[in-house]
Amino acid sequence: MKRNRSLIRRINLRQTKKPIVIITNGETEEIYFNGFKDRDSSYVLHIRRRNSAPQNLPRQVSNILQGVHLRGSSPEIWLVVDKDNFPIEKAAALTKAKKYYFAYSIPSVEIWFLLHFCYTSASMTPAQAINRLSSYLDLPYEKTKDYFELLAPHQITAINHAKKLEQHHMKQKANLLKANPYTNIYMLVEKLTRH
């Protein structure tokens, strides 16, 4: 009887959790955010990846949602992209128009990972971000390897560094969609780690 109550409680708890759908255009982001699925969270995560330019992702959301089994309330939708060599201004505008959330990294998601270990406001290429990250990891960085457990203990540091970087760019009156380096992934991570 006690076991049945525990099972019912877990089922009810899962049904009360708000769904968040995270749609990425990169495998690295997909691997990273899958790490949050095993964490105690107030959210049920659905992570999907589309190999597509950032500006195409907002138009693909309705098709992606058809493949996601959602229960209860409407999902919160986050598009998570790297700038890499793509313009992201159009993706940001489309995302805002559709009332989705937009998390992005310039030059690439590796700047978010790097902020777990150090603060920097120095402009860099994706290759430079990877080289700097490799030096902190003490091993060669691979884009398709799961580093979540290695990064997780430093999430608060990364959030603080990302906020400091944002303040730096705002003081410079920089366009955050073009600032290098920049990431606002911290907003989604803060949400996922809040209990």
Image: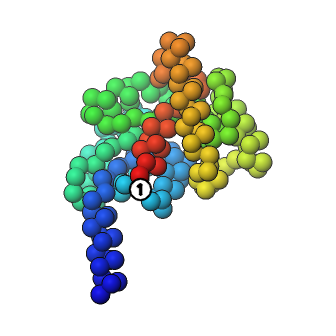
- For this orientation, the residue located farthest to the front is 2
Image quarter of residue 44: bottom left
The amino acid at mark 1 is Ser
Residue 146's x, y, as percent? 60, 55
* 122 lies above or below 55: above
Image quarter of residue 69: bottom left
Report how many numbered discs are placed on residues in the image. Answer: 1
- For this orientation, the residue located farthest to the bottom is 1
Residue 127's x, y, as percent? 68, 34
Query: The N terminus lies in which quarter of the figure?
Result: bottom left
Query: Which secondary structure, mark 1?
Result: loop
The residue that mark 1 highlights is 41
Q: Residues within 10 Å of mark 1 (few under 14, many from 20)?
A: some
- Foreground residue among 112 and 156: 156
Please name the residue shown 33% across and 84% down the image: 2
* 75 lies above or below 183: below
Residue 34's x, y, as percent? 48, 56
Residue 25 relative to residue 8: left or right: right
Please name the residue shown 49% across and 51% down the image: 33
Residue 120's x, y, as percent? 66, 28
